[in-house]
Amino acid sequence: ANGPFDLDAAATAANTLCPHWLGADSPLGVDALTVAWLVDGRTCRVFCNPPYRRGLVGQFVAKAALEPGRGHCQGTLLVPAATDQYWWHAYVWSQRLGGPYPPVVLDFPRGRVRFLRPDGRPAGSPTFASVVVRFSVGSALILTMWSHALTPARDAGVLAIGWMTVSLPSR
């Protein structure tokens, strides 16, 4: 999934597999949604398996989509393949193109993803399919929400993607 990664954007010291992380007990920051995804002030490769609590996945996807446009990182997320969610259509999938927004890259793993506990023992797997979503630095992808830049818009807005503008429905 385009590693090795420099930064885990949703981890703890006990479960990170990267040299740097954002989350509880991190020297870089506790809230990954409010800090730049940089390591030592430089662009890096970020992995994120965000908390799957209601609303948080969409906030992490929005953050990962916007960070490359700021020159901060290439973000790779492991998220539910929730094609019915607002964030999927706002940041990942273009109905008009019939595929992912350029240059979003998707990888749908076969079967269910299996998670491990910090000690390496199996922790089970989710009851839904997962997808790996990658947003790249230096790409033509420019995401600008006219309201609520880091969270899905609560009102109708506009999403500008390179040469195309798409009206976003209100939720």
Image: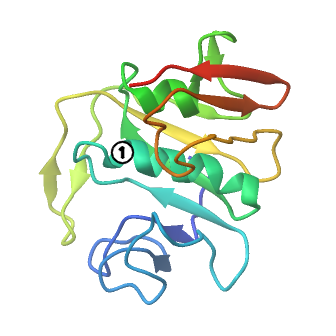
Can you give x and y, in whole percent of width and height, for residue 167 in the image? 63, 20
Examine the rendered structure and indicate whether residue 128 appears above or below residue 61.
Answer: above
Answer whether residue 81 is visible to the viewer in this image: yes
Q: Residue at x 30, y 79 (%)?
A: 24
User: What colour-coding does the image apply?
Assistant: rainbow
Given residues 1 and 95, the one toward you in this image is 95
Decide which of 64, 160 is in the foreground and name it.
160
The residue lying furthest to the bottom in this view is 27
Residue ID for mark 1: 57
Classify 52 as above or below 167: below
Question: Picture coordinates of residue 133 (x, y %)?
Answer: 53, 39
Front residue of this view, candidates 55 and 46: 55
Residue 90 image position (x, y, % from top left): 54, 29
Percent of width and height locating residue 160: 73, 32
Q: Secondary structure at mark 1?
A: helix
Amino acid type for the residue under numbered disc 1: Val
Instruction: Using the rendered image of the protein, determine whether residue 108 is visible from the camera's viewpoint.
Output: no
- Tell me the residue at 32%/49% (across/down): 56
The residue drawn where x is 74% and y is 52% is 69
Establish if 19 lies above or below 77.
Answer: below
Instruction: Give the class, few, some or many, for how many residues have Cα within 10 Å of label 1's Cα (few <14, many ≥20).
Output: many
Q: Is residue 36 left or right of residue 160?
A: left
In the rendered image of this protein, does residue 139 appear above or below residue 68? above
